[in-house]
Image (tube, rainbow, N blue to C red):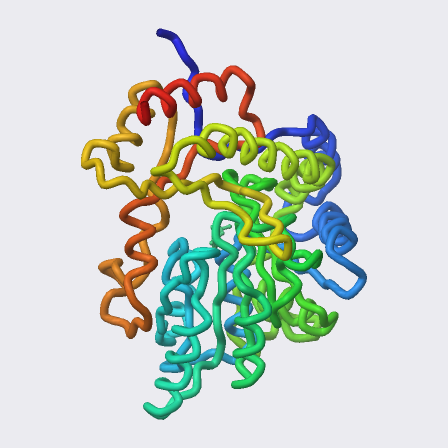
Amino acid sequence: MNNKRIYLSLSQQSGFEQEYVQKALNSDWITSGGPNVDDFENELQQYFNENSFIAALNSGTSAIHLALILLGVKLNDEVICQSMTFAASANPILYQGAIPIFVDSEHETWNICPKSMEIAIKDRIKKGKKPKAIIAVHLYGMPYKVDEIHAIADRYEIPIIEDSAEALGSKYRGKKCGTFGTFGILSFNGNKIITTSSGGALITDSKELKEKAIFYATQSRDKAIHYQHSEIGYNYRMSNICAGIGLGQMKILNDNINKRIENHNFYKNIFHAIDEVELFDNLNDNFYSNYWLNTILIKSNNKDRNVENLRLILEKEDIESRPLWKPMHLQPLFEKYPYYGGGVAEKLFNNGLCLPSGSNLTKEDKNRIEKVIRTFFK
Ligand SMILES: *Cc1c(COP(=O)(O)O)cnc(C)c1O
């Protein structure tokens, strides 16, 4: 057979990307920052709301790093972080020499568990240090339990960094993800809902904090004619070429989200009749996931019908699938840090699988995927 490979997550192009990139090439703005970056920020600000200020950066990881810096996280400070996530959520804590405190997931949104989080906060305070920040993630586009998590964080006056890298377009109670935390972050990596090839953004409701973020992102240059620096700076600004791709991508952001939701409905149709599989789905009407990735849990006791065997059979047909994020508290890099919770994240990791969910999945791709899955569970 000569099938083309079906990938887990690829973005669509709008066809307008070249035009904006060409505009940058034709001008002298082949550098970081510039007119495309300003325009991209403005379009994102409009997409969110009039109270959102957005700094376009070179990655989502740098956005998280700058959020920690802006919150004053320093050497030996403690930062709570959802364990079930991509390492990019947690690595910037170590950049600051701070200590990650990992927290388990609950089984309804797979995100940070309010109960375990409060236990962690209380225990860290008892041990002498109040956590400086909380990094909560909308995993695979699914909003975390926003009301519960923010109520606890507010009670202890701990700011939240909302890792919305996978959740552009997701909503909780009708409000867009990325706007709940003291800072929100986005990623425009190649596999996300829209891409700038590589890129990210920091969201805040303060113009001053946006400007401060750009200050740090451009080597912390003091206001002087010569190059003068009083603080550590970073080279984190988005490039004008990348922002051109982003401007082209903005034209199909809503389209891409709709396609991902269509993919979800396609999987729903397959799995509703397969009892041993649970498709990751909105918990109730308060939750609106962009379904960046569709994920399943296999609950069967049948030892052959497990996630690894499904992955291998899909792979044989040139269809990419992947285990869920391996929780941070089980990673060699992070296992020495404190962890609060039980075995929810670990169980998800052992029984979960991410299925192809790109905005570019065709009818033919879906037929191929459906055939393999139906045969496997027959
Ligand atoms: C992709 C991702 C990031 C990091 O984004 P980059 O742009 O790749 O640096 C952070 N957190 C989560 C949960 C992600 O999926």
**Quadrant of residue 159 in the image?**
bottom right
The mark total stands at 0
Foreground residue among 341 and 362:
341
In the figure, is residue 341 to the left or right of 173? left
User: Measured along the vertical axis of the image, is residue 3 above or below residue 18?
Assistant: above
> Which quadrant is the C terminus positioned in?
top left
Q: Please report the residue visible at 38 percent of the width from the left and 76 percent of the height from the top.
A: 98
Q: Residue at x 35, y 85 (%)?
A: 123
Identify whether 191 is placed above or below 227: above
Q: Nearer the viewer, residue 324 or 229?
A: 324
Q: Quadrant of the N terminus?
A: top left
Residue 30 location, quadrant: top right
**Residue 339 location in percent, x, y?**
30, 71
* Residue 211 percent location from the top left of the image: 69, 69
User: Residue 23 occupies which quadrant of the picture?
Assistant: top right
Is residue 171 depicted above or below 153 in this figure? above
* Residue at the far left in the pictured view: 303
Residue in front for this viewpoint, 150 or 285? 285
Q: Is residue 201 visible?
A: yes
Quick check: 5 left or right of 337? Answer: right
Q: Return the residue found at the far top.
A: 1
